[in-house]
Amino acid sequence: MSENITTLTDATFDEVIGSSDKPILVDFWADWCGPCKMIAPILEEFATEQSDKFAIGKLDVDANVATATKFSVMSIPTLLLFKNGEVIARLVGAKPKGALLQEITSNL
Amino acid sequence: MAEHTRVLIVGSGPAGLTAAIYSARAQLRPIVIEGEPSSTTDQPGGQLMLTTDVENFPGFPEAISGPDLMMKMREQAIRFGADLRVEKVHKLDTTQLPFRAWLGGDLEPSITADAVILATGARSLMLNVPGEERYLSHGLSTCATCDGFFFRGQDIAVIGGGDSALEEALFLTRFASTVTVIHRRDSLRASKIMQERAFAHEKIRFEWNTQVTEVFGDDKVMGLKVRDTVTDDERVLLVTGVFVAIGHVPNTTLVTDQVDLEHNGYVRTTMGSFTNIDGLFAAGDVQDDVYRQAVTSAGSGCIAAIDAERWLEAQGM
């Protein structure tokens, strides 16, 4: 996994989100979710290509139920875009790279 | 200016990727249009991307997850030089040679091909009852692995009687409080081993001879109105999650008005993978309503690749 992607946990979530100087896109995923694996390489590409615009974090919902529940994650993959500690966009379901990027940047 | 290829493969499930491996090894340099990422079955990798463990694909005594199996097939296709593209064909013209394919939002043909292997698979059949569309993604789903997580501790229903339905039901027991399998007959068509597991599971119960007539709720699913197929009695099942696993319909939209279809909508193939159009071959679930297994799809992908190769040779192409 790219160094530019932060692994988040229930314990570290609030702190990482709160201290991020850029908007941060959090990927809620699980090991048994095919579509989640489909977008993983896209997020790796974003981590390199979009690093000036937003950071990327990943949260394994299986191991971190509290955070997933707190943000009402109902379906995975769900991508939540945080800015200044608040959720400013919610993207549900796998999508092509272009579509994802467009939705993200239109909310930045 | 369109790119030309000798073999264009549309679809990247087991059929498409096996065809890719064989065509690539035959030095035909196939282009494979895999589909675009999505949470439905037309994504790269096809239907197996939405499953968990695949236990019946030969060669994997420890089982393998659907996504992992597709990843291996993909790597194998790449190894032999198949040109895989994460894109979607939105139009295909097989009325004349060379065949033409339009990708993405292209207005002009993106690719021309001497032969096409159609391996676009199938998608979930829906119930087509009131409330279904409204509650899709609000408690109603066709992908247990995508959405099952949300239903922790809840009472949910799986509609269907085949292996897909039971596989989903068993997967969902990880999260749900109870899983009710709703089936319109009194016996399942699933494999015996899946039936045994489902019957043995304490969280799974069955509603036989039961048909769903409506999905209702407020802003999320609250229950199902059902009808007994034998007595006609109507009643209500209170569930907050509904998974539809009643079967599949072939993805033939690209060729519906061009190629001969069977009565059930599946592409008609003869002597292997031949369709009524010379140079157009079909493999996998798009042309198979009978077996629909990963291994039979892979087998038919191989058949299509060999059929296409021999056909091209015979044409002197």
Image (cartoon, rainbow, N blue to C red):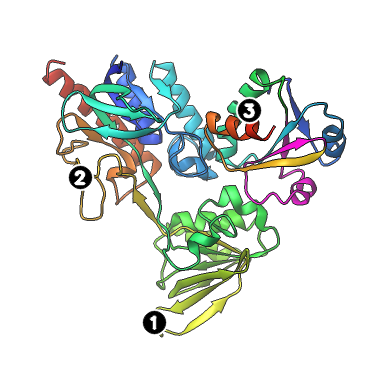
- Within the magenta stretch, is there residue A78? yes
Q: Position of residue A99 (x, y in %)?
A: 54, 33
Mark linked to residue B303? none
Residue A40, how many percent across, how many down?
61, 30
Residue A83 position within the rendered picture, expressed as x and y whole percent measured from the top left? 78, 35
Q: Nearer the viewer, residue B139 or B171?
A: B139
Task: Give the residue pinned by disc 3.
Answer: A43
Chain where mark 1 sits: B
Report which quarter residue B28 is drawn in: top left
Q: Are marks 3 and 2 on the same chain?
A: no
The reply to whether callout 2 and callout 1 are in contact (CB within 8 Å) is no
Q: Is residue B110 above or below residue B120?
A: above
Q: Residue at x 21, y 44 (%)?
A: B257
Residue A83 shown left or right of residue B251 in the figure? right
Image mark for residue B230: 1
How far apart are the two marked residues, 3 and 1, measured between alpha carbons?
52 Å
User: For the residues tagged 3 and 1, is the chain the same?
Assistant: no
Residue stretch rendered in magenta on the structure: A56-84
